[in-house]
Each structure stands twice: as structure tokens, then as C-alpha cells.
Image: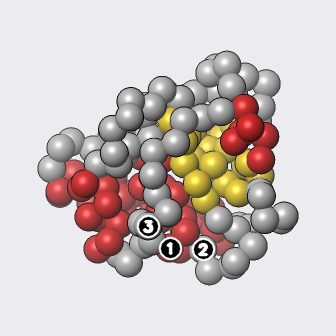
Amino acid sequence: MPADDFILFVDDDNTCLGPLAAGVFNQTCTNPQYEARSAGVATTGKPIDKMILDTLMEIDAPTAELEPAKLTPQLADKAFMIISLGPQDFASDPVLKGREVTHWRFERPKPDIASTRQVRDRIKMRVNSFVSKL
């Protein structure tokens, strides 16, 4: 995979599920050919949720590269694969329309550390399965 290609995790505002999945993927996948990034269909300018970063640091997942990004056609064009996360599928978003998008249904965690850990662990199981097939 060329250096510009990556797996793109897309969520609503890129402060929660997308960065969580990208961090878990980058911690789990040891093949340097693959990396993950995240983007939101409607970014709010808010930073990534502190509990998301804290739960990623608990499993030694890299967080330095994680920052909120807006989904753009240019970003989607460079993605090797696009995975949407959340209660709804974002495939109908204008940027994603007509692109192949895989949807992983996850609810946003409640605003407490236990809920955030549960969602992280469910995402980690899904990522582990995904990585084993790469």
C-alpha cells in the first residue's frame, strides 16, 4: 500500500468513535504497511474526548497523531478503505456517496470511564478480527 493510503474510520464529529478505532487499530496492527486515521462528517472544533484518550493510553495505543479532522473528498480519495462507526451509517454523506463504505455499528459511550472502556474493548475485538484478515 503506498504511503498516502490508509484505513479511514469515519464518525459524526471525530471526537469519539473514529479516533478510538484508529488508535486501537494502530496499536493492534503490527504490519507497517497499514495505518489508520479518522475523520468526522460534521466536525465541531472540539478536541478528542479526554476519556477516549485516557482509555487508549491504558492499552498503550498511540495518541499523539490523533486530532479531529473533517471528512473531505481529498481525504476519502486517499483512503484504502473507509469504515463508518456509530449508530447510523454515513454512506449517504455527500463525500461518501458512491464510495465503498463498511459500517461497524457502535453506540457512543456514556460520559463515564467504565462505558468508554466497554466500547473500546468491543471496538478492539472487532479490530482484532479485522486485522487478522489483512
Q: Nearer the viewer, mark 3 or mark 2?
A: 3
Please state, as top left, top right, bottom left or bottom right, where the C terminus lies in the image: bottom right
Q: Which mark is residue 27?
A: 1
Q: Secondary structure at mark 3?
A: loop
Classify 10 Å Cα crowding around label 3: few (below 14), some (14-19), many (20 and above): few
Tell me if label 1 and label 2 are in contact, CB under 8 Å: yes
Which quadrant of the rendered structure holds the N terminus?
Answer: bottom right
Image position of 33 with respect to 44: above or below: below
Residue 64, labelled with which disc?
A: 3
Badge 2 element: loop
Along the line of sight, the residue nearer the viewer: 69 or 12: 69
Disc 2: which residue: 29
Relative vertical location of residue 61 with respect to residue 122 in this rendering, above or below: below
Which residue is at 63% across, 49% downward? Answer: 8
Label 1: which secondary element: helix
Q: CA distance from mark 3 to mark 2?
A: 17 Å
State the image quarter where residue 13 is shown. Answer: top left
Could you say where residue 92 lies in the image, as x and y percent from the top left? 64, 20
The image quadrant that residue 72 belongs to is: top right
Q: Is residue 76 visible?
A: yes
In the image, residue 79 above or below residue 72: below
Residue 4 placement (x, y as % from top left): 77, 58
Q: Nearer the viewer, mark 1 or mark 3?
A: 3
Q: Residue at x 33, y 38 (%)?
A: 46
Q: Amino acid at mark 1?
A: Gln
